[in-house]
Amino acid sequence: MWTRPRLVAAVLIGMTFGAVDSSANASGGPGEEPVVQSVARFASYLLNAGWAWAALAVAAGWMATTPAPAVPDRAVPSGGAPARGAVGVGAAAGSLAAGGAVLTYYVSDSILRAEPFARYVDELLIWLVASVLLCGPLGAVGALVRRPGRVGLLAALVVPAGAALQVIVLAPGFDVPPVQPVHPEAVLARWLVLTTAAVAVVLLVRRRWAGRSRRGGSPTRSAGGSSTGAGR
């Protein structure tokens, strides 16, 4: 029962993401105030990155497979690991979120730039197909985050690892000619992503390791208590 509203929410979240991304790009023009340009440029370096769009799909897949409080859920068992159907729901949510983001991005571009929408149709179709095909698997990854053990950990590490890899290899704003200086907003965005990704990896690994230790430590304590009692 809760699947359809979650998929609708994924579309709305994607549309919001696309509109904000387009607005950030349009607000960084030469006619704006320096502070507005700086903030918009910084936001653009974050939102225009491939990892951010991937994170949108993963988050949509995770959200769509989150069981509603106090409501029995067939897709997510009580143990927290998603059933096979939940992976499909996550994939659908990832594709819908990305599709909504792409469509809204180009509609917003057309409005904010006062250009005919027909000018964007060809580019829109290319990115719409690409985003749906690529973000479906990423949505499934979001559903797999709930699985215990290595599968869940690897799924949770996809976004921070991908973000760190992109800003190291091809950071937004750094693809400029050698004679042109890199904007300080690009440098700040790069270090923010790297720092956040590193912290996220440490926290995720530590959390999984702590959970594994708790599950493995309980039987040991029980056995130890029994042997102590027997010794007395």
Image (cartoon, rainbow, N blue to C red):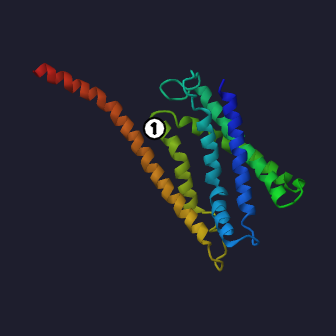
Residue drawn where x is 69% and y is 31% of the image: 5
Q: Where is residue 225? Give x, y as percent.
A: 20, 24
**Quarter placement of the N terminus:** top right
The residue carrying mark 1 is: 150
Q: Does residue 13 appear left or right of residue 125 in this picture?
A: left
Residue drawn where x is 61% and y is 53% of the image: 51
Q: Does residue 208 appear left or right of residue 180 in this picture?
A: left
Q: Tell me: residue 5, above or below residue 164.
A: above
Q: Where is residue 181? Give x, y as percent.
A: 63, 77
Q: Tell me: residue 12, above or below residue 85.
A: below
Residue drawn where x is 69% and y is 49% of the image: 17
Picture quadrant where residue 61 is located: top right
Residue drawn where x is 64% and y is 54% of the image: 50
**Quarter placement of the C terminus:** top left
**Residue 151 shows in the view:** yes
Residue nearest the viewer, comparing 154 with 44: 44
Q: Where is residue 54? Give x, y as percent.
A: 63, 48
Instruction: Determine the residue located farthest toward the top in the rendered image.
Output: 230
Picture quadrant where residue 69 is located: top right
Within 10 Å of disc 1 (Cα), the crowding (few <14, some 14-19, many 20+) is: few
Label 1 SS: helix
Give the amino acid at mark 1: Arg
Q: Where is residue 162? Give x, y as percent.
A: 56, 52
